[in-house]
């Protein structure tokens, strides 16, 4: 999994600077990210505090694990169905 360069605290700090009136181009240059990244962060983390952002990340990780387990179970079930449908 790709490791993020910025933590939730840092991202929310940058967004608070933006809400305080800093220009997007200046923020992007200062923090070394593109303006598009700032807009993506704003779409995702706008209005959140740090604890909510951490909880969101935790839920996303749990959801990814559950999706993987479901996919594995579906593959197992399909393989068993195929095996049982063959005549011996």
Image (cartoon, rainbow, N blue to C red):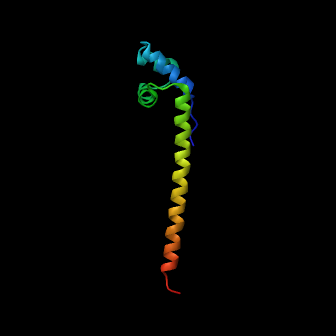
What residue occupies the far bottom of the structure in this picture?
A: 88
Q: Quadrant of the N terminus?
A: top right
The residue lying toward the viewer, choosing from 29 and 43, is: 43
Q: Is residue 82 above or below residue 63?
A: below
- Tell me what residue is drawn at x 51 percent, y 52 percent: 67
Q: Is residue 86 above or below residue 31?
A: below
Q: Is residue 13 above or below residue 85?
A: above
- Tell me what residue is drawn at x 49 percent, y 75 percent: 82
Residue 50 picture quarter? top right
Q: Classify residue 43 as left or right of residue 49.
A: left
Give the mark count.
0
- Tell me what residue is drawn at x 53 percent, y 47 percent: 64
The residue lying toward the viewer, choosing from 52 and 14, is: 52
User: In the rendering, at what x and y percent does residue 14 appear?
Assistant: 50, 20
Residue 44 picture quarter? top left
- Tell me what residue is drawn at x 52 percent, y 30 percent: 52
Q: Classify residue 55 as left or right of residue 26.
A: right
User: In the rendering, at what x and y percent does residue 60 appear?
Assistant: 52, 41
User: In the rendering, at what x and y percent does residue 49 appear?
Assistant: 51, 24
């Amino acid at each position: 999994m790709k490791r993020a360069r910025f933590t939730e605290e840092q991202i929310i700090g940058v967004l608070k600077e933006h809400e305080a009136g800093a220009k997007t181009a200046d923020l992007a240059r200062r923090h070394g990210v593109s303006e598009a990244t700032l807009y993506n962060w704003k779409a995702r983390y706008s209005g959140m505090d740090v604890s909510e952002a951490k909880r969101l990340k935790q839920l996303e990780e749990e959801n990814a694990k559950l999706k993987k387990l479901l996919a594995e179970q579906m593959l197992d079930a399909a393989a068993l169905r195929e095996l049982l449908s063959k005549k011996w």
